[in-house]
Image: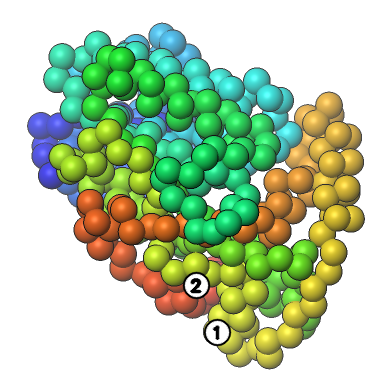
């Protein structure tokens, strides 16, 4: 368990998962330090006992200062939503920041654990589901490729320098406040919901509160030392199943229509090619289309076996709860 004497550093603290993690850490009474870009809005986090370090997570001087006396690192920072960003941004956030943090951690005299939050995306499309922690890397885009490189680097560094490390690969994260999966809920609200592609569309979900419980447990559980964990709800949930539950919760008939995905991939590539040079966020891009067409099914028993069953939400229960939350917020 984390205590009031422990000093932790969180990256990606103002992001969706980071926001929940900061709140969970505050309840432990530990000393929280966090890195946030100058442009990041702190919102309600500003009222919590957090020492903020403003700057880029790949700034060497900032990392050196923020890491002084740190016992635990929770590295969540990701360039996930920056579709208009150049490839160098992904490398800086996913690779260089990881290197700087790990090297600085290795110099701390009382460092205890580096929790590196990666993604199941490093395994890409799963041809023969379910995949597990031993499945080969299969990245499908620059986001996933740089995540792979960052993960591989820190795994090797940990072995070489004896750095205490646990890698967490979250599945599709959802929960109150999330906007990434909101597009599925909006599609489900349509009289007839379009389903891209003709595959199974298998997905593993993880409620953000459940994910945070596992992230914190990984930091303080001895059995997690040196391990990689896929973190997702035990049940696979396809996009058609998700839309069915959303429609039921909204009291709508379950009507959907399968449509080819290839035209949308083409539009996505064109939009990305046009918008990136103009520094404009594309309205549609290949990764967004791939979200609806890739199969990502995983065996998740390892994390439960080592860290316990920490799930509060089933996939169906979590989706119903989130549907009602979106309605209450006026988002749906």
From the top left corner, tell me how far across and down residue 101 is, in percent: 37, 20
From the top left corner, tell me how far across and down residue 32 is, in percent: 26, 34
**Quarter-of-image position of residue 99:** top left
- Callout 2: SS: helix
Residue at 68%, 37% (x, y): give it. Answer: 141
Horizontal arrangement in the rendering, residue 35 relative to residue 139 (left or right): left
Of the pair 89 and 4, the residue shown nearer to us: 89
The answer to whether residue 42 is seen in the rendering is no
Residue 184, compared with residue 161, is above or below; it is below
**Quarter-of-image position of residue 104:** top left
Residue at 73%, 85% (x, y): give it. Answer: 255
From the top left corner, tell me how far across and down residue 271 is, in percent: 86, 42
Residue 5, compared with residue 120, is above or below; it is above
- Callout 1: SS: helix
Horizontal arrangement in the rendering, residue 322 relative to residue 225 (left or right): right
Specify the quadrant that holds the C terminus.
Answer: bottom right
Residue 267, compared with residue 241, is above or below; it is above
Determine which residue is flagged by label 2: 319
Of the pair 113 and 72, the residue shown nearer to us: 113
Residue at far front of view: 128
Neighbour tally class for label 2: few under 14, some 14-19, many 20 plus, Cα within 10 Å: many
- Whichever of callouts 2 and 1 sits on the residue coming sooner in the sequence is 1
From the top left corner, tell me how far across and down residue 64 is, in percent: 34, 12
Horizontal arrangement in the rendering, residue 277 relative to residue 111 (left or right): right
Residue at 24%, 56% (x, y): give it. Answer: 305
Whether pointer 2 and pointer 1 mark residues with C-beta atoms closer than 8 Å, the reply is: yes
Determine which residue is flagged by label 1: 249
Q: How many marks?
A: 2
């Amino acid at each position: 368990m984390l205590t009031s004497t422990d000093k932790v550093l969180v990256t990606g603290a103002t992001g969706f998962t980071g926001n929940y993690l900061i709140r969970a850490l505050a309840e432990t009474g530990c000393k929280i330090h966090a890195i946030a870009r100058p442009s990041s809005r702190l919102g309600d986090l500003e009222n919590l006992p957090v020492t903020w370090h403003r700057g880029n997570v790949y700034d060497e001087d900032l990392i050196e200062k923020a890491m002084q006396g740190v016992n635990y690192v929770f590295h969540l920072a990701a360039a996930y939503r920056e579709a208009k960003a150049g490839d160098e941004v992904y490398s800086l956030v996913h690779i260089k920041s990881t290197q700087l943090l790990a090297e600085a951690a290795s110099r701390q005299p009382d460092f205890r654990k580096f929790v590196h939050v990666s993604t199941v995306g490093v395994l890409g499309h799963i041809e023969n589901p379910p995949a597990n922690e031993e499945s080969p890397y299969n990245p499908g885009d620059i986001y996933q490729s740089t995540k792979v490189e960052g993960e591989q680097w820190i795994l090797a560094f940990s072995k070489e320098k004896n750095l205490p490390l646990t890698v967490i690969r979250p599945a599709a994260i959802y929960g109150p406040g999330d906007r990434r999966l909101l597009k599925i809920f909006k599609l489900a609200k349509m009289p007839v919901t379009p389903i891209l592609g003709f595959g199974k569309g298998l997905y593993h979900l993880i409620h953000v509160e459940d994910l945070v419980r596992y992230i914190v447990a990984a930091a303080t559980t001895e059995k997690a030392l040196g391990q990689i964990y896929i973190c997702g709800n035990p049940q696979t949930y396809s996009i058609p199943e998700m839309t069915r539950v959303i429609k039921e919760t909204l009291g709508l008939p379950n009507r959907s229509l399968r449509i080819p995905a290839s035209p949308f991939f083409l539009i996505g590539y064109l939009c990305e090619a046009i918008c990136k040079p103009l520094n404009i966020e594309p309205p549609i891009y290949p990764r967004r289309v791939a979200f609806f067409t890739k199969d990502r099914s995983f065996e998740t028993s390892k994390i439960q076996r080592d860290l316990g069953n920490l799930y509060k939400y089933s996939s169906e229960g979590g989706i119903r709860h989130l549907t009602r939350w979106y309605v209450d917020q006026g988002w749906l």
